[in-house]
Amino acid sequence: GSTIGVLGGGQLGRMLALAGRAMGYRFATLDPTPDSPCGQVADQIVAPYHDAEAARKLAGMSDVITYEFENVDAGVAAMLMSESYVPQGSELLYTTQHRLREKRAIEAAGVKVAPYREIRSEDELREAVQAFGTPCVLKTATGGYDGKGQWVIRSEGEIGEAYETLSRAKTELVLEQFIRFEKEISVIAARSPRGEVRAFPAAENIHVDNILHLSIVPARAPAEVLEQAEQMAVRIAESLGAIGLLAVEMFLTRDGELFVNELAPRPHNSGHYTMDACRTSQFEQHVRAVCNLPLGPGELLTPVVMANLLGEHVAPLLEWMGDEAGLPEGVAAKVHLYGKHEAKAKRKMGHVNLLTDDVNKAIAWVEQSPIWKS
Ligand code: ATP
Ligand code: MG
Ligand code: MG
């Protein structure tokens, strides 16, 4: 069988390897942490991501190389491309590593993003805040995640502090107009080298403290809006010439307008529902895409609510699993844990897919459950 090399050893790599192993592939992963979630289920190379020697070793072991995070060093990506087969290329990474490049690429696909401006000085920021009005959102162009690297500017009095704080990241800054969205949704599209494209059903996402808490599918929004969202994701994937998965995060306003927030060229937390609720999971789809196999049908088999398990949720979850009592009629739970050793607060440790006949019933159960109380 062929070996798929994965840059990054986190839970996304682990679930990718578990899906791909079921399809007969072997996996190797490069990650600085020994016994990483992916390293537990693959051959592991323990080294920093930018270690050229280690990357060359991964290339030597692999027939195909992919990645599970987008901040892959450009030099490492180039080296991997010369030593192995990297179907996703480096351009998709280059684009999605930088918010300004990403926004321009989305606009080039004919899709709307929140109005934004590149910010090169505090004066420019002041000017842009006046133009957009408050609140507005200042973001670092690179490196941000889980809301880190951004500042919601609520009054002009915060401009100096916001600029000073985010400037320390030594990257460009971008100011975005604040979108008073009604819902956040995401669509994960997959595209293969032969040009086949498919989108998974749109998920409605609820965040707590900037970390994904729930993904709800079908999203509770008009069918034509969801269809439009799915078409937008397909259009972006095609326009970028993306290979593999491309996750598209969007804002939906009260008048049914959609703005793309950001992209991720990899499996996405909001796609974990596909593992138990779709004919093909996002991970299997990614393997199919990077191996240039025909894509699988993404259709939804059942309504589903995915609830993330953070460090503080693990102990009450394990206690609940002792009897798994108290699930409402028509709701079934599938628990996934990532094999992380330390259940630190706010750390993503696993997720639960609640297969249900009514998403509201599953949401209500999560809301009253002691697991997510802490
Ligand atoms: P992720 O962990 O998803 O990569 P991130 O740190 O890259 O997060 P964003 O997704 O850009 O950050 O923003 C985090 C959250 O902040 C969004 O999900 C949304 O709730 C809010 N947000 C970001 N930009 C805007 C905006 N322009 N208007 C309103 N809310 C916003
Ligand atoms: Mg992001
Ligand atoms: Mg985001």
Image (tube, helix red, strand yellow):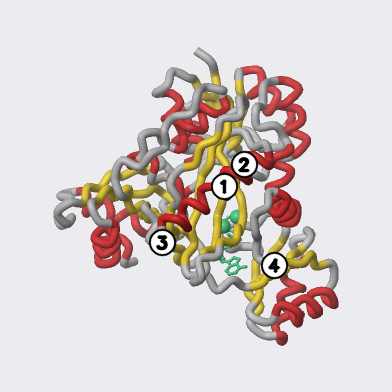
Q: Residue at x 32, y 50 (%)?
A: 304
The image quarter in which residue 240 lies: top right
Residue 170 shown left or right of residue 16 in the figure: right
Marks 4/1 in contact by CB < 8 Å: the verdict is no
x then y, percent, for residue 359: 29, 57
x then y, percent, for residue 264: 59, 47
Judged from the image, the secondary structure of the residue bearing numbered disc 1 is helix
Marks 1/2 in contact by CB < 8 Å: the verdict is yes
State the CA–CA distance, disc 1 to disc 3: 17 Å
- Identify the mark nearer the N-term, 1 or 3: 3
Marks 4/2 in contact by CB < 8 Å: the verdict is no
For disc 3, the marked residue is 221
Marks 3/4 in contact by CB < 8 Å: the verdict is no
Q: Using the image, tell me which numbered label, if any, was put on residue 115.
A: 4
Name which residue type carries label 2: Ala
The image quarter in which residue 24 lies: top left
For disc 2, the marked residue is 237
Name which residue type carries label 3: Ala
**Quadrant (top left, top right, bottom left, bottom right) of the C terminus:** bottom left
Judged from the image, the secondary structure of the residue bearing numbered disc 2 is helix
State the CA–CA distance, disc 2 to disc 3: 23 Å
Q: Residues within 10 Å of mark 4 (few under 14, many from 20)?
A: few
- Identify the mark nearer the N-term, 2 or 3: 3
Residue 372 in view (yes/no):
yes
State the CA–CA distance, disc 1 to disc 2: 6 Å
Name which residue type carries label 1: Ala
Mark 2 residue CB less than 8 A from any atom of ligand 2: no
State the CA–CA distance, disc 3 to disc 4: 23 Å
